[in-house]
Amino acid sequence: MIKNAFAYVTRKSLKSLIILLVILAMSTLSLISLSIKDATDRASKETFGNITNSFSMEINRQVNMGTPRGGGNVKGEDIKKIAESEDIDDYVKRINSVADLVDHDIIETDETRAGMSEERAKNFGRTVMLTGVNDSSKETKFVSGAYKLVEGNHLEPQDKNKILMHKDLAAKNNLKIGDKLKIKSNLFDADNEKGADETVEVEIKGLFDGHNEGGVTAAQELYENTLITDIDTAAKVYGNTEDTAVYQDATFFVKGDKYLDKVIKNLGKLDINWREYNLIKSSSNYPLLQQSISGIYGIANKLFAGSLIFAGVVVSLLLLLWMNARKKEIAVLLSLGISKAKIFGQFVIELLFISIPAFIGSYFLADYTGKMIGNNILQKVTGDIAKQVAKQASSSQLGGGAEVDGFNKTLTSLDVNIMPKAVVYVVVFMSIVLLISLIVSSLNILKKNPKDLLIDTN
């Protein structure tokens, strides 16, 4: 039987080659689609780490409008109550404030200078944005990839009077790690409600990099003009302490063995005025990431399903033509007393002789083309999202800055590798499809007796 099957496949080389190429192409696309999904999973996990098991505490703007400048005013005591919960492993709290550089200059562009009036230049000509945080490695802009530490170390809870500075701002002012500089309160800042006039000497602990992805209207929206500070420094320029300051928001990391939804539900029992706040899963802070992942998944799923269906339909038609051309051969075999099961078994072996080289070839072809196809799909998905965001931004006149760019974060690359698990899945599913195609194409012929088959050939 095996010898006959091999002889037929090699004798009908053109027909065999056509079927082999169909199986090769469809198996390759199936492998690529599964590998793209796997690469998407890995990319999202590498990009956002453990945000899937964390949540943010933000103000409820329906009832709480925040600070005069529109920032958050989360109470430190409420953050502390949640942080002390047995379900919380760690937390990050942020203060957004404004200060002026003393005897140093900010970064400006032609775009920011064009939109600056004489009065604004006088009041905010050296103004920088401060983000006070107790652990900068877990601060939103670093987690999203908008900022990247390139030299030095991150800020830690015990740090006082320490900052991270953008490398371009440091270069402009001839500053380096270990250097000290002074910042002071800005009396024209609407959020400086106490009219604080504090001067704080800070030391540069690290340098970060990153650049705006969209346009800006004010110099303070530039990444370069943001200082990441310890909590005490950001609070002091407004005349506050860590305990009396109001916070932009806080992010809480849930212990690994805890279910996030249940933890959030249980926190509702704490003595906190929940009407003023919203607890938001951190994954919800990156809607475009989720949209890009969903878009890639959607295309990969369609590619996988389409490959299987196309392979099933085309191979069924080819096998049907193949079987019709073999009616006389089948009639002779039946007349010689060979059972229908053995004849069908020969067909299966013939298909195996064709499929095995196709499956092996698909592995190497998918490995060669997978990265290119994967990143083409990624570019299409993110390109469509970028157009949508640009349209929304132009209609709503959204500002720029790292917070907006982090919110608009999407996947940027896919490392597509053909995994053994994907190969197994494709071989199993494709084999099932091919077996069904073989049954469909041969069932009607094998039902007939030799005489009928011989009559059909005339």
Image (cartoon, rainbow, N blue to C red):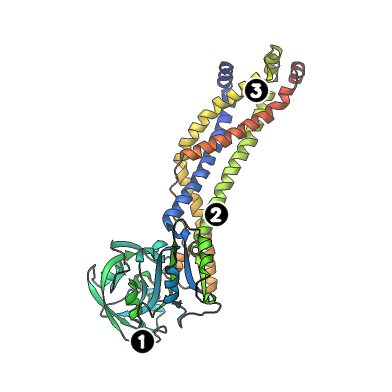
Contact check, label 1 and label 2, Cβ < 8 Å: no
Of the residues shown, which amino acid type is indicated by label 3? Phe
Mark 2 residue crowding within 10 angstroms, few (<14) / some (14–19) / many (20+) = some
Q: Quadrant of the N terminus?
A: top right
**Mark 1 or 2, which is nearer the eye?**
1
Q: Earlier in the sequence, mark 2 or mark 3?
A: 2
Residue 402 lies, in percent from the top left, at 41, 68
Image check: 393 left or right of 317?
left
Q: Which residue lies under the disc numbered 3?
A: 344
Image check: 196 left or right of 342?
left
Residue 295, numbered label: 2
Q: Secondary structure at mark 3?
A: helix
Residue 413 visible? The answer is: no
Q: CA distance from mark 1 to mark 2?
A: 47 Å
Q: Residue at x 42, y 54 (%)?
A: 46
Q: Which residue lies under the disc numbered 1?
A: 187
Residue 268 lies, in percent from the top left, at 53, 70
Of the residues shown, which amino acid type is indicated by label 1? Leu
Image check: 183 left or right of 405?
left
Q: Secondary structure at mark 2?
A: helix
Mark 1 residue crowding within 10 angstroms, few (<14) / some (14–19) / many (20+) = many
Of the residues shown, which amino acid type is indicated by label 2? Gly
* Number of marks in the rendered image: 3
**Mark 2 or 3, which is nearer the eye?**
3
Q: CA distance from mark 3 to mark 1?
A: 89 Å
Q: CA distance from mark 2 to mark 3?
A: 43 Å
Residue 438, numbered label: none
Residue 452 lies, in percent from the top left, at 77, 19
